[in-house]
Structures are given as C-alpha cells and as structure tokens.
Amino acid sequence: MIKWAPKSSRKWMLMGIATIGTSFAPAFAGIPSPGMKASALTVTQLEAEINALQSQVKALQSGQKSVQQSEESAAEVRQIVKQVLSDAKTRSQYMGNALEAGYNNGFFIQSANKEFNLTINGYLQYRYTWSQAQRGDNVTATGSPIPSSDTGNTNGFDARRARLILSGYAFKNIIYSISGDFASGSGLGNSFQILDTWIGYEFNPGFMIRTGSMLVPFTHVEYYSSGTEFPEFAAAEAPFDPVRSLALDVSGNLDHNKFFYDAQVNNGSKANNLDGSANVSTSTNLDNRMGFYARVQYAGAGTNADFTDSPDVSWHKHLVWAVGAAAGYEEQNSSAGVYPAPQGSLALAGLATPNNGYLGGVTASGSLYRATVDAHMKYRGLALNGAIYYQQYNAATPGAGGSTALLYKTYGTGSVWQLGAYGEAGYFIVPHKWELAARIGDLTTDGQGKQSMEYTAGVNYYIFGENAKLQAAFTYLPNAAYSSPNIGSNANTQDFITQVQLQVKF
C-alpha cells in the first residue's frame, strides 16, 4: 500500500519533479513521443494544484487572523461582563440574590440576607351595640336629670377598628412603622386617622430610639388593643389614657425580654396629628408645653412576650406573671391669647361634682401628674389582669380661662385628683376555644362621695386564636361618669349595655 505524504510535502515533491522535467526537456526535444503531451498535462495539473494550495494557505492565514480578532473581542466582552457583575454586586449588596416572602405573624417580604424587611399586618373589629339609659341617682352639674324621660335606648353597628400596619426594618437597624385606621368609631366619621407612624434606629434589643406618632407609654392595655377579654377597655381606664402623641422615644427589652422600659418626651395627651393641628392653631404648628412619660414592665415568670394579650389563649402549662408601672407629667393651657396658641388636645373626663352629677369633658389648662401600676397572671387557661390609675390636676389661676373658672366654682380650688381601678378574670372552659370573663371597675373623684362603678360579664369564642374571634359582653353602669360611643355610655345615667364584636386579625 502506498502511503501519501502530507499535502505540504507533496507540494514540494511535485515542484521538484517539474523542475527535473524542465531540465531534461532539451535532451528529448527531438524525440517525438506521446509522453510529451502527458508531461505537459502533468505540469498544468501541478500548477493548478499549486494555485489551489496557495489559496488554502491564504484562507488559513485569514482564518488565523479572524481567530485572533475573535479572541480579542471575547476578552473585551469578558471584561465588560466582569464590570457589569461587579457593579451589580455593589448595587445589590444589601438585597442578596433573591427575595423571601410568606407569613409569620403577618405577611412579609424580605431580602435573602434578611437586611431588609416589610411586614404587613391589619385587623378589623365590627361591633353591634345596644344601650339602654335610665335615670340614675345623679343629675348634671346644672341640676337637670339625664335623660329627661325615664328611659331611652340606642343601638347600631360600628367599625371600632379597621387598621392597616406596615412595619419592618432596613439595613438591619433602621426600624419603622406606618399605620392608620379607616374605622368610623369615636365620632370620626369615615376619615382616615394616622396612628403609629414612626422611624427609629435599633442599636440592639435593649436600646432603640424612635421619633414620630406613637403610643404614649402609660396604660398597659393600649399595647394590645386587639387582644382583650372584652370588646372594649374598662370604663375606669379612659380618663387616664394619653393614647398617642408626636414624640421622641427611647425603649428596649433587657434580660432576655424579661424587663421592658420606655421613656418619652411628647406633645401631650392625644396630640398625634401629624400637622400639629390638635394642639396648635397657628401657622408654626409648634408649642412649648411638653409632656414626659415613662413605663417599665417586669416579667417575674415567663417573659414579656407572654403578655401581648390579656387572655391565656396559649394555655400556659406553667404560671407566668408580670407587673408594670408608669408615670407622666404634662402641662397644657387652653386659655385664649396664650403664646403661641391655645392647646386643647386634653379633656378631663368623669369629674364628679360635690352636689350634682359628673362634669362633661373639661379642657385642661394647667399641670397634670399621672401614675399607674398593673399586674398580670396566666396559668392553664386562667388569666387575671388589673390596674390602678391616679392623676392630679392643678389648674391655672381663676382668670386664666373658662375651664379653670368652672373648676374653682365647682370645687372651690383648682386642684383635683381622680382615682380609677379595675380587675378582670378570664377562664377557658374549653381550651383555646371558649372563654368566660368578668370585670369590675371603679372611678372616684377627690373624695366627692360619688363612685362610677362598672360590672361586665362576657363570653368569647376563638375561631383561630386572636386572629379570628367572636366576643359578646354585657355591661352595667349604675352611674355613668362620662359619655362614650365606644362603651355605649351616657353621662349621669344608669346604663345597660350589650356588645357583640367580630375580630379578624392578620
């Protein structure tokens, strides 16, 4: 078998043969032979093949150049890709490579590295209230009984709360909450109300600082308004509750959430309107009368996380208990002509008069001192909760305004105090599902000899824990100290009130 050499070698062999043939051509010039024609054809073929080979060489050279260009282009592309990936990594260093979403005590969206989080919560409370008012022992400060007839009743449906809450953190330590209420309760109509809307920085669980609209750290029940034994707070609690305000706040949980503290400087009670219009009516939207409040809570058994609601829905197998205390001071002046403007966000409710009934809401114009202590216990479906409230109001001089003059006329002094207390118990007759509850409360004014008592009994059915429950309660107020659309009370009457409420929370 003949083995052919590579094409490059064959090329030079053929060229050599052609050269030899050319050299010997004169010697054979005189000899006619058919080989002469064959030799001419062979040279022609060789030339054609040489030309073809040359074309192939040129093509190979061109291809090699294209490969070099492609490699250079590829290097450029790789460099661009590297730069894009580096830039993307820099821009998304806090976002990770993916998002996580789900439900964990609220719907949440967060980055894979958990440095950004948004949690969505909300709850709805729809209520039916039936209230019958009968003439009580008291009359108004002007001497007129209420109502003018022996009996009167009212009833209807109400959206007590319809809240949406957005909260979470950014860059791990920046914390925030944005919430509002669409409910029509408390005479709000259907207007939207800003609630806890603040931003802060959490250095660690034991120390965080916040600013914005938030709860004033005083009454314990405000911390779990969706986790109560009854559709409404105790009647003895409302006159002492500062609710919310615009504030600067420092708080934290210490000792593995056994000790909680919260200290706050704010614009005073119920002054959380973001435009400042609740307490100032001038274009400056500022005021110089600040409030100061602080609260502490200690869980002697268990942790403070066990007391984010009042009933023992979890059915604690071991006894847990906690105690809390708070104090506050604020000064307000509702008199006309004061600088920069009258402040009227705080109205004193439930003030008993010496000879008649209870005064209506008296707009504060002076200094107010407050204090409270509360205690809580849970064990195997039994929950006990109670609180005592005290406040001392020192009015301004008699000539300072109408509300001050009324106090001096009624009491002969501008200094008056109020004391309120309540105790309640709840027990699950069917664990996690059916609960019976009872409450008794009292409101007293400065030894005036009049007490506004409250007696309430209720039954609750927990469809899905605090997330879905049905509540029913009956309240008897022998002498209602103030009028409240939430409670269904009418000042200076004997009230019989029935409330049924459905709550859905997520």
Image (spheres, rainbow, N blue to C red):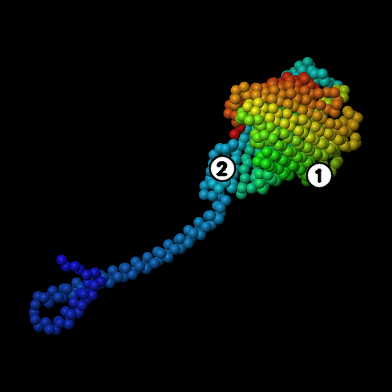
The type of residue carrying mark 2 is Ile
Q: Position of residue 457 (x, y in %)?
A: 69, 21
Identify the residue at horizontal 13%, vertical 74% (top origin): 38
Relative to residue 163, is residue 47 depicted above or below? below
Q: Secondary structure at mark 2?
A: strand
Quarter of the N terminus within the rendering: bottom left
Residue 196: where, in percent of width, then height?
68, 39
Q: Is residue 436 left or right of residue 28?
A: right
Task: Give the residue drawn at x 31%, y 68%.
Answer: 59
Rendered residue at 75%/40% (across/down): 294
Q: Residue furthest left?
A: 32
Q: Residues within 10 Å of mark 1 (few under 14, many from 20)?
A: few
Q: Tell me if 467 is positioned left or right of 269 in this view.
A: left
Q: Mark 1 to mark 2: distance in Å? A: 41 Å
Q: Residue furthest top?
A: 150
Q: Which residue is mark 2?
A: 109
- The local crowd at label 2, few if under 14, some if 14 to 19, many if 20 or more residues have their Cα within 10 Å, is some
Secondary element type, mark 1? loop
Task: Tell me: residue 49, above or below residue 166.
Answer: below
All told, the count of numbered labels is: 2
Q: Label for residue 288?
A: 1
